[in-house]
Image (cartoon, helix red, strand yellow):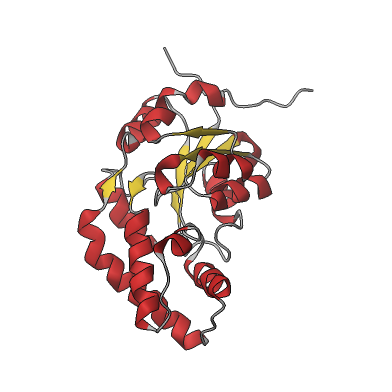
Amino acid sequence: MLKTVPRVPALLLDLDGTLVDDVYEHALAWQEAFEEVGIPLTVWRIHKQIGMSGSLFVESVLEDSGRHLAAAEIERVQKLHAAAYERRFHQVRPLPGARELLVHCSQNHIKQAIATSADRDSAQRMLKLLDIDPEFPIVTCDDVPDSKPHPGLFLEAAGRLDCPISQCVIVGDTVWDQLAARRASTIGVGVLTGGYTEDELCRAGAYRVYRDPAELRRHLCELGIQMKH
């Protein structure tokens, strides 16, 4: 007997840089935090690691810069980053078409969830910016032992939607999202709103790359998602 495949795949969406325009606020906050502990870094070197979980991000940046910090200092850097980002939060805005994409999917009965490396408190603030119901399915770094590029966030989100990961489409702005999609053996889709180029995202495994959530919404049919009429 043939296995039934849902007509409409589920969307698993990253948050920072995919639905909310805050990648550079994060990069500048990290730069400020590292400088506070005596590690001056250029923003572009920081930016290329954005999208990983906080602890893995710090380890990767330190390795790239050839520096080392003790565990207590790493924790201090993370706290300094949180404070620096908080000072910039008033500049954060939803990305073009982000709200409309979420509403459009809801109206067309497309299953969707957010999977983010942010903690739950930070994610809830983003949901308010997007005018999303607090009960919207969301998985954060607090819910899984390993964050991106490990696929755990997306696997957990698929589980909450009661949808096999192979029948989900992962949407993200970084190469780490695409790597997580490949490791989960499902389709990854990129958006350019995080500062990565189309070539970088495609080489990381993206099936399609769109300018922003607005363009993604207009091309959902390319992902095999049919709208109701």
- Would you say residue 68 is visible in this rendering? yes
Q: Name the residue: 39% across, 52% down.
A: 16
- Work out whether 133 lies above or below 75: above
Q: Residue furthest left?
A: 90
- Work out whether 3 lies above or below 166: above
Question: Seen in the image, is 92 located left or right of residue 217?
Answer: left
- Would you say residue 205 is visible in this rendering? no
Residue 99: give x, y in percent of width and height: 31, 37
Residue 134: give x, y in percent of width and height: 32, 49
The quarter of the displayed image where residue 187 is located: top right
Q: Name the residue: 22% across, 67% down.
A: 87
- Work out whether 52 lies above or below 174: below
Q: Residue furthest top?
A: 229
* Image label count: 0
The quarter of the displayed image where residue 119 is located: bottom left
Say which of 40 and 51 sits in front: 40
Say which of 2 and 114 sits in front: 114
Give the position of the C terminus as an image quadrant.
top left
Question: Seen in the image, is 207 located left or right of residue 38?
Answer: right
Give the position of the N terminus as an image quadrant.
top right
Q: Name the residue: 42% across, 48% down.
A: 194
Q: Name the residue: 43% across, 30% down.
A: 216
The quarter of the displayed image where residue 63 is located: bottom right
Residue 19: give x, y in percent of width and height: 37, 44
Q: Residue furthest right?
A: 1
Residue 17: give x, y in percent of width and height: 40, 49
